């Protein structure tokens, strides 16, 4: 019978033997993060993959993340750890609907959250991440912004950039949307000394009550660097586990036990093992027109800093 320790050792051996770079998004479980070469947010992982020497990259995350890796590393073989691991937010908006929105707001620059499909990015002007959205939109010369697909992240940016006009597609993350102001009230009552750290994909009624709003890696960094000793975490609950390992002297509480991404939980340590054996996962391919169109959107983000 395999144990977690035995399986991890075999994965470490196989990835070295087969020259595979393993990327693990921060919403993966701790046992997967421990065998990864790089962990963190989706775009940061794709940048690390582009610099890695390995010719094969295994993305333990969801489909749009693996697509982003392929966009930046076209010559590498990119494997998605579980074929069914998608992102409902990335799939909410298709090209036809986006075309209709662009006709409705013809003078607006189209800003795409990184949590979108490669094909959708081809029809957008610039891409943003949760950590860069505010900075990039402030730097853009356009005054009218069509932000897709997450209206919560978009509204969080809009509240801080009142000099610009924002239009939204009313989509968002079905995990973060489960968090409400009453969850904040209950969590603060239970843990009155804890600081509330939330992701900007949360509703405004939640983010407006937070002590800190930021990306997944931003939340983790803030918790580690803070002098506070207890925190309420308003993002995917796997982050609590990672912070418990990294900061055993601090206490972490979920804002809601419902904040779980089922797509991220599809990938198991056994899936990683099978991918390395060539018996699992899915190779990601993009036609060159789509890849270059999506890369243009990402390049515009990098140009804005």
Image (cartoon, helix red, strand yellow):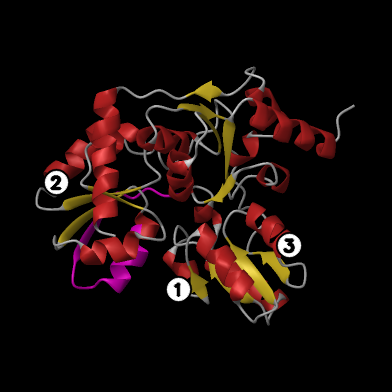
Which quarter of the rendering shows the N terminus?
Answer: top right
Query: Of the residues tagged 2 and 3, which is closer to the observer?
Result: 3
Q: Residue 195 placed where, x, y %?
A: 61, 77
Secondary structure at numbered mark 3 = helix
Q: Residue 29 placed where, x, y %?
A: 68, 45
Are dots 3 and 1 in contact, CB under 8 Å?
no
Secondary structure at numbered mark 2 = helix
Distance from Cα at disc 3 to Cα at disc 1: 26 Å
Asked if the magenta segment contains residue 92, the reply would be no
Q: Is residue 284 above or below residue 156?
A: above
Q: Residue at x 35, y 24 (%)?
A: 286
Query: Of the residues tagged 3 and 1, which is closer to the observer?
Result: 3
Residue at the far top in the pictured view = 279
Q: Residue 233 placed where, x, y %?
A: 61, 65
Q: Which numbered disc, 2 or 3, marks the residue that appears first in the sequence?
A: 2
Q: Along the horizontal axis of the image, is 28 left or right of 302?
A: right
Q: Residue at x 44, y 28 (%)?
A: 76
Q: Is residue 58 above or below residue 144?
A: above
Q: Residue at x 25, y 62 (%)?
A: 137
Which residues are drawn in magenta? 154-173
């Amino acid at each position: 019978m395999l144990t977690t320790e035995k399986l991890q050792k075999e994965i470490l051996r196989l990835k070295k033997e087969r020259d595979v770079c393993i990327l693990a998004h921060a919403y993966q479980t701790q046992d997967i993060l421990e065998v990864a070469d790089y962990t963190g947010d989706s775009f940061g992982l794709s940048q690390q993959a582009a610099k890695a020497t390995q010719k094969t990259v295994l993305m333990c995350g969801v489909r749009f993340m693996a697509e982003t890796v392929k966009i930046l590393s076209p010559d590498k073989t990119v494997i998605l750890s579980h074929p069914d691991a998608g992102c409902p937010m990335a799939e909410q908006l298709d090209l036809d609907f986006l075309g209709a929105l662009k006709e409705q707001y013809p003078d607006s620059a189209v800003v795409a959250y990184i949590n979108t499909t490669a094909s959708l990015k081809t029809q957008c002007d610039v891409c943003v991440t949760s950590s860069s959205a505010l900075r990039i939109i402030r730097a853009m010369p356009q005054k009218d912004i069509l932000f897709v697909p997450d209206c919560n992240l978009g509204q969080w940016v809009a509240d801080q950039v009142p000099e610009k006009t924002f239009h939204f597609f009313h989509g968002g993350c079905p995990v973060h949307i489960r968090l409400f102001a009453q969850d904040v009230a209950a969590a603060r009552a239970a843990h009155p000394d804890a600081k509330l750290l939330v992701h900007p994909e949360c509703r405004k009624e939640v983010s407006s009550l937070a002590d800190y709003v930021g990306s997944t890696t931003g939340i983790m960094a803030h918790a580690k660097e803070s002098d506070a000793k207890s925190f309420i975490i308003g993002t995917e609950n796997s982050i609590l586990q990672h912070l418990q390992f990294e900061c055993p002297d601090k206490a972490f509480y979920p804002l809601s036990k419902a904040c779980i991404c089922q797509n991220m939980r599809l990938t198991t340590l056994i899936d990683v093992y099978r991918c390395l054996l060539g018996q699992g996962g899915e190779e990601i391919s993009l036609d060159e027109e789509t890849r270059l169109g999506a890369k243009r959107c990402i390049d515009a983000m990098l140009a804005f800093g």
